[in-house]
Amino acid sequence: MKVNNEQNSETLESKIQTLLDRQLFDDMESNLIRLRYGIGIEQPLPPSEISRIMKIKAKALEVLVEQVDRKIFNQLKNEL
């Protein structure tokens, strides 16, 4: 089962990378996506680290995360 989860994770990461390559997101959204999903870095970062790196308050980060996740979901859903 672990192999399957790793494959799903790699598939999601590659799909998100494709969305990033298409430049569907602004710079802030792209940075958040890379940090949140661990794209181009060793592993995803926790919200507290993302907040510190991006210099965004935790509450504002929550709102941005919801918006970006919804945008990613809708893009991936439209491709099915």
Image: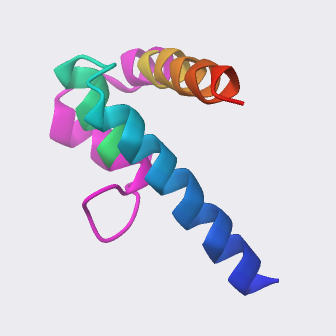
Residue drawn 48% across the image and 54% down it: 13
Q: Quadrant of residue 74?
A: top right
Query: What residue is rendered at 47% in x and 25% in y?
Result: 65
Residue 16 pos. (x, y %): 45, 42
Could you tell me which quadrant the N terminus lies in? Answer: bottom right
Most extreme residue toward the right is: 1
Q: Tell me the quarter of the picture where residue 78 sits.
A: top right
| Image quarter hosting the C terminus | top right
Total count of labels: 0
Residue 29 falls left or right of residue 58 = left
Q: Please name the residue shown 55% across and 27% down the image.
A: 69
Asked if residue 55 lies left or right of residue 76, the reply is left
Residue 48 visible in the current orientation: no
Vertical comparison of 63 with 58: above or below = above
Residue 11, given in percent of the width and then of the height, sits at 57, 59
Model colouring:
rainbow
The front one of 4 and 47 is 4
Q: Is residue 14 magenta?
A: no
Residue sitting nearer the eye, 10 or 35: 10
Residue plotted at (41% across, 58% down): 44
In the displayed structure, does residue 22 sit left or right of residue 53?
Answer: right
Asked whether 37 falls inside the magenta stretch, the response is: yes
Above or below, comparing residue 10 to residue 39 in the picture: below
Q: Position of residue 76 (x, y in %)?
A: 61, 30
Which quadrant would residue 30 be assigned to in this image?
top left
Res 34 seen here? yes
The span shown in magenta is: 35-63
Rendered location of residue 72, percent (x, y): 53, 27
